[in-house]
Every structure is written in structure tokens, then in C-alpha cells.
Image (cartoon, rainbow, N blue to C red):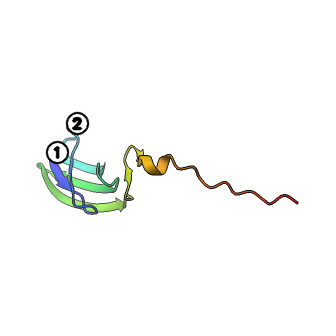
């Protein structure tokens, strides 16, 4: 079963181990990383709402490679 993410509008698969006959819980969009509260009854979406908005370039596994390899700025006090 798949649902459409309310943020990125891409289809995301509901894990096979979830009971789609009666489920009330959260799933993470595999495309944008947004967290959705989902209520399923008899394999139909009864309710879907946004819990947390994902960020572009961030996947559920972590930040995109380009941003994760960039070092953070080193802030130091000037020598006196």
C-alpha cells in the first residue's frame, strides 16, 4: 500500500509489517523525511496529518552527501 506525502506529494510505501486494517501511528516519507500521523481503517486512509516537515536534501537515513562532507565553519577567537 502507498500514500501520497502531504509535503512533497510523492508516493511513499507503507511498511509491510503494519496492520493496514487498523493502524494509528506515524510513518516517515522516504523522499523528503517528513513525519506523518496516519490513521488507516480497512486499508483506507481515514486521516493523515503532518507531524514534522522534512528538509530538502535530507533523507530518513541522514543528510545528503554534499552537505555531510562539508566541514562546519571553525570559529576561533583572534589571538591577542
Instruction: Report x, y in % for residue 10.
Output: 21, 56
**Which residue is more in the foreground, 66 or 24?**
66
Query: Quarter holding the C terminus?
Result: bottom right
Residue labelled with disc 1: 20
Q: Residue at x 44, y 49 (%)?
A: 66
Residue labelled with disc 2: 17
- Crowd band around label 1 with a 10 angstrom C-alpha radius: few (<14), some (14–19), many (20+): some
Local SS, label 2: loop
Does residue 43 lie above or below 52 as drawn? Answer: above
Q: Residue at x 31, y 62 (%)?
A: 50
Local SS, label 1: loop
Instruction: Report x, y in % for residue 45.
Output: 16, 56
For this orientation, the residue located farthest to the right is 80
In the visual, does 48 lie left or right of 73?
left
Q: Residue at x 27, y 61 (%)?
A: 8
Q: Residue at x 37, y 59 (%)?
A: 56
Instruction: Report x, y in % for residue 61.
Output: 39, 43
Amino acid at each position: 500500500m502507498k500514500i501520497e506525502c502531504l509535503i512533497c506529494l510523492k508516493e511513499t510505501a507503507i511498511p509491510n509489517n503494519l496492520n493496514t486494517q487498523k493502524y494509528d501511528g506515524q510513518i516517515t516519507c522516504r523522499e523528503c523525511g517528513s513525519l506523518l500521523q496516519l490513521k488507516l481503517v480497512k486499508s483506507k486512509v481515514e486521516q493523515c496529518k503532518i507531524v514534522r516537515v522534512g528538509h530538502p536534501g535530507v533523507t530518513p537515513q541522514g543528510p545528503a552527501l554534499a552537505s555531510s562532507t562539508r566541514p562546519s565553519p571553525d570559529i576561533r577567537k583572534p589571538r591577542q
